[in-house]
Amino acid sequence: QVQLVESGGGLVQAGGSLRLSCAASGRTFSSYAMGWFRQAPGKEREFVASISWSGGSTYYADSVKGRFTISRDNAKNTVYLQMNSLKSEDTAVYYCAQARMQSTVIRTTAYGYWGQGTQVTVSS
């Protein structure tokens, strides 16, 4: 069993920054790709970013490209999402997830384990 615990969410003004963390326990963290997703009220969960098992490959949604950075520390079993230049439309609950494969992947069905989510609210 895998447990994923997100932290770092909160309230920030537009243009500000936040760094989300996701601590993993259980299945070998370093063997699988990780991803960040978000869900705003009344909307479907959407892909934000993914990172390969080694951290050597990353992929971003167009809406966050150039503003968000995903990274991982396999020694600490933790994945991060650095969010800069935040906009009101970034407001959502952010979830980290562990993929069933090593490479970056977009679709939610490729992820087998999910955290409980952390709220990010950007005020304009």
Image (cartoon, rainbow, N blue to C red):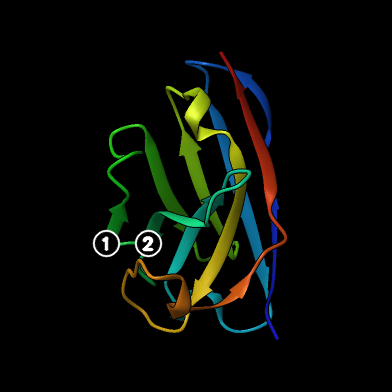
Q: Residues within 10 Å of mark 1 (few under 14, many from 20)?
A: some
Q: Which mark is residue 91?
A: none
Q: Is residue 4 left or right of residue 38?
A: right
Tell me the residue at 63%/21% (across/down). 12
Tell me the residue at 47%/34% (across/down). 83
The type of residue carrying mark 1 is Ser
Which residue is tagged 1?
57
Tell me the residue at 52%/57% (across/down). 45
Q: Residues within 10 Å of mark 2 (few under 14, many from 20)?
A: many
| Mark 2 and mark 1 residues within 8 Å of each other at the beta carbon | yes
Most foreground residue, 21 or 92: 92
Most foreground residue, 24 or 111: 111
Image quarter (top left, top right, bottom left or bottom right) of the C terminus? top right
Mark 1: secondary structure: loop
Q: Is residue 66 visible?
A: yes
The type of residue carrying mark 2 is Ile
Residue 75, horizontal then vertical, whole percent: 55, 65
Which residue is tagged 2?
51
Q: Earlier in the sequence, mark 2 or mark 1?
A: 2
Residue 20, horizontal then vertical, whole percent: 59, 43
Most foreground residue, 4 or 107: 107
Residue 109, horizontal then vertical, whole percent: 46, 78
Tell me the residue at 31%/50% (across/down). 60
